[in-house]
Image: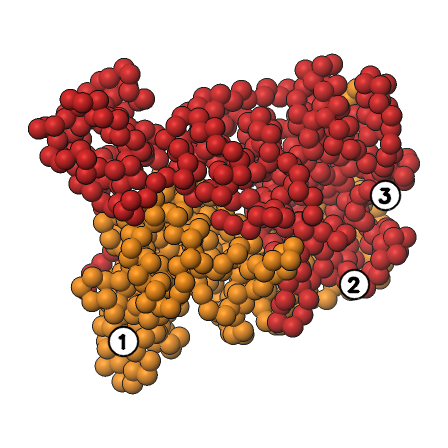
Chain colours: A red, B orange
Amino acid sequence: MEFIAGIKQKETKEISDILAQGISGKVKINGYIHTIRDMGEVAFVVLRKREGLVQCVYEEGVTNCVLKELKEGMTVEVEGNLHEEERAPLGFEVRLTEVTVLSSPKEGTMLPLPISKWKMKTSLETKLNYRPISLRNIRERAIFKIQEGIIRGFRDFMFSQGFTEIRTPKIVAGNAEGGANVFKLEYFGSKAFLAQSPQFYKQTMVGVYDRVFEAAPVFRAEKHNTTRHLNEYTSLDFEMGYIDGFEDVMAMETEMLRYVFTFLGEKYDKELKLLEVTLPKIESIPAVRFDEAKVLISEKYNRKIKNPYDLEPEEEVLIGKYFKEEYESDFVFVTHYPSKKRPFYAMDDPADPKFTLSFDLLYKGMEITTGGQRIHSYDAQVAKMMARGMNPEEFSNFLMIHKHGMPPHGGLGIGLERLTMKLLNEQNVRETTMFPRDVSRLEP
Amino acid sequence: MEFIAGIKQKETKEISDILAQGISGKVKINGYIHTIRDMGEVAFVVLRKREGLVQCVYEEGVTNCVLKELKEGMTVEVEGNLHEEERAPLGFEVRLTEVTVLSSPKEGTMLPLPISKWKMKTSLETKLNYRPISLRNIRERAIFKIQEGIIRGFRDFMFSQGFTEIRTPKIVAGNAEGGANVFKLEYFGSKAFLAQSPQFYKQTMVGVYDRVFEAAPVFRAEKHNTTRHLNEYTSLDFEMGYIDGFEDVMAMETEMLRYVFTFLGEKYDKELKLLEVTLPKIESIPAVRFDEAKVLISEKYNRKIKNPYDLEPEEEVLIGKYFKEEYESDFVFVTHYPSKKRPFYAMDDPADPKFTLSFDLLYKGMEITTGGQRIHSYDAQVAKMMARGMNPEEFSNFLMIHKHGMPPHGGLGIGLERLTMKLLNEQNVRETTMFPRDVSRLEP
């Protein structure tokens, strides 16, 4: 009988092991052959490992293999001697004595794009077509480490504030956001949909845990093929009970963002430097009413107001510009959106029910968050449904929570890929999506 | 111009604040009215808060409201004086002076099930029909706190071992596990599927980060309506490169489980006690070959081997029983599953290609994990596809990684709800699923 216990302590070292133990003596490491540069007497064989690139030096007669037999894309285990070397990416190099090939790419294949280039300068289309390979580029993969950091920071902050992490179903019978942009599904003879948001479920779970969050995929069948739309994206959602108003939700988001950027600075410094990202410093975020924002930018930038009920993308850009110029803020909350453009669960402003107790957060001129206070009273929720021509009976599962009591509550949803895009100053949300799904892209 | 900054410091306290500050003086708290017990001169009004139940004492003439106006399901903000009280759930009570009602349930409604009972004794069917309300029961909600703890522990451990968290698409063009149990989707005129697992993508990302993990929903259109099948569940997946064999994957899982149970013991002690859960102590996990396990239990329990290629549920139960009796282990790895029953990406055992370098982990007689080593060579992967009558051209996006080089690698997927079910000794996986989806259940 065999027994499986602790993780085998491997002889091979990671970069952090080497930096911790000091640059001297023999070392064994493994990795991908990222590049080979033949200089005649010696050759630089750069290994790609999860923590970075390690410069190895091949020397004929010293290294136990034939240089020509090594190829980019192979994975190897090597042995050699550590030497300090200022010009190497990590300040050291490994002078190779032994090389063992672990695996090889297919004979005679050429890389479809120059992943070992520092900046690939490859078109987005090509990068996406070869995503499994283009992500092997050092800068490309750094994007998604930073994205990992955003999610981690988000979750850490939520836990610190007493939120509970929930798992809500993605296959649903009805949809929260309404409209036509919902994917339909065959479900054992019933009609089902893919969840556009965890809205009903996160409100439900406020009745259980007071404060809840989820970071999970959502699905929108929007036909827009723009630089900012995706048909599947990661939504960072939270929902909190016992609020005094939707300002509590905005304050929670403000603090969350402060925390996330601090966390990134501490834990993802290497990737931020690599991509030359400057983290925003948030003290407070200005907030402006929707209708006032419209007028502000209309006057300042001499632009006619066309649609009084929603912000056009260009208006979002101008509001961003205005608050950057006037208040040096990359972020601005736009509050009190018209009731007409907000979902049926949004609470209307008692002071003027044409508007809702809601907000969007714009980051560098683009909406990255939608949130607000929700209706908690059964009668008020049913009345709003009726006023919209909806049939409350179709929502009996959702209304169950209002029927049996809900605290005043509100919450928000943040588009992770958009937040990452804006932080990294990318021009297309697909740049910051691991495997984007859009109207014309379902693969890889 | 308004500015949104730090989270408002509320006057209302959470249970942990009170316990930290000491049981004396005035306090303001909010919560749900969980139960009201009228004792004549006084009444106990128990508030449900995210951290537990707070006993409040209503006294006529002292408390500023009429008892009859308070109802279960209301949310309130109350003020009162703290007193130590041994018989109260937390060792203290609040003698109410002021009660402000924040929200009320619908007039004249009755709860569909007795959520304030310590043990509800309500049928699973009823609990699921009223899930939004049944989760408000203290024991029900504790189940999903423990589940949160499992995911947290899993992620923490993965990060500690150098794994990168990835986000893979749930809408896919092809499917990894094959077979008919896949949900079909209308996708802008193309045919698409819901991902049965992140298999292709996690293997892909090993080529980028060496070690990756994801905790996310997966979808299986299985028509089984059993106590252990779900059509949507949370899969804890990891995949790691540079392995010497699939034993490395099993060792990583063993250590992960040790970590998770330790983490639960430290952070979720309250919930574990509430549900009377004993955490398993893992030193090592026995491993037995698939074919040997079949023979072992056939001999020991005098049972004929019917299907030589797969384990029947009853066989899993008996293997679990055997290893509990013989080795006092709740866990057992079953290794070397027949090639016939494993997917095309599984690596065959060079010593006997009828079997694969793979394993399942059984926990208390039920499979909770499937894993193994994957094929990394392009030629070997294409050959196995051809041998199965598959067309490699349909998998060109997946084969891109083999073509351009992959390290030896392997990984696994764990069913979160099953793991939770077995830990809590539940008899049906729906008990440990927040909002289960099965052949006949799509709501709530």
Residue at screen point 66% across, 42% down: A225
In the drawing, does residue B180 fall left or right of residue A81?
A: right
B102 or A389: nearer the eye? A389
Mark carried by residue A340: 3
Residue under the image location 66 percent in, 34 percent down: A368
Taking the spot 67% from the left edge, 60% from the top edge, the residue there is A184
Amino acid on which the number 3 mark rests in the picture: Lys
Residue named by callout 2:
A394
Q: Is any part of residue B187 visible from this angle?
A: yes
Q: What is the distance, in whole Å, between disc 1 and disc 2 at their CAs?
A: 51 Å
Q: Is residue B149 left or right of residue A215?
A: left
Q: Is label 1 in a helix, a strand or a loop? A: helix
Q: Are marks 3 and 1 in contact (CB under 8 Å)?
A: no
Let me know if residue B139 appears in the view.
no
How far apart are the two marked residues, 2 and 3, measured between alpha carbons?
A: 21 Å
Q: Are marks 1 and 2 on the same chain?
A: no
Q: Amino acid at mark 1?
A: Lys
Q: Quarter-wise, where is residue B110 in the image?
A: bottom right
Q: Return the residue nearer the eye: B33 or A141.
A: A141
Disc 1 designates what residue?
B294
